[in-house]
Amino acid sequence: MPNAQHMQKDLLAQMIGKEAACAIEDLFSKHGEEAVKKSAFVVAEVFDSASIFEQLTENPSEMRDKTEKKLIKSFHKNLTLLVQKTWVEKCDEALKEQVLFQLDGVCAALEEKKYAAVYEKFMLLLHDTVYLLFGPQSKKDDFGEYALRIDPDFGVFWQFLQKISPSMPKSEHIGRMYILLGMCFLANY
């Protein structure tokens, strides 16, 4: 009998295609920056953010900086709206306020290109946001399959979050790509 993780992997491949499902796996199993970048681009395509991701990783620095500032602003604005509009249990109101407070600091650090310094806070912020959106359901073993079935785009994002390390990768460039992917998804969700 297949386990839940194998079933999620099969469901993911059915929904986004085998190449994209493999790219999510490769994104975290490959170690060279170019290999990670190639997989990240495929994941960005799944997030409907391929052109902006390309601008953020390929353009000359001046153009890249402008695009990145715009992405950070969109990420901040959209995440603020998502969190503010989410109804939470009374016991989670403090977490909601904490997420909104931390969002300001994380975005300020990203604007200053402090990827390594803010990486862990950024990833925690994403996980806390998912908890606020879905509550205790997000802590269950079958949440990945649930998310894929109710909202395939979000389900792919959840698969991304489940595979990503909460600790900064050895390469700051790879850490930056992971942060950019997270922002690309949530800036438009």
Image (cartoon, helix red, strand yellow):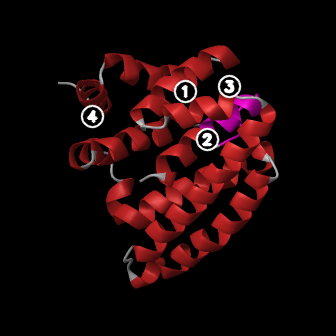
In the image, residue 147 lies in the stretch drawn in magenta: no
Q: CA distance from mark 2 to mark 4?
A: 29 Å
- Give the residue type at disc 4: Ala
Q: Mark 2: few, some, or many residues within 10 Å (few <14, many ≥20)?
A: many
Q: Nearer the viewer, mark 2 or mark 4?
A: 2
Q: Secondary structure at mark 3?
A: helix
Find disc 3 in the rendering and name its residue.
58
Where residue 180 is drawn, which disc sits there? 2
Q: CA distance from mark 3 to mark 2?
A: 13 Å
**Gap in angstroms between the C-alphas marked 4 and 3:** 37 Å
76 vs 18, nearest the viewer: 76
In the picture as drawn, the residue positioned furthest to the front comes out as 63
The residue beneath circle 1 is 40
Q: Which residues are magenta?
A: 167-179
Q: From the image, tell me which residue sits under label 4.
A: 4
- Crowd around label 4: few <14 · some 14–19 · many ≥20 (10 Å): some
Measured in 3D between alpha carbons, the distance from the residue under mark 1 to the one under mark 3, in whole angstroms, is 13 Å
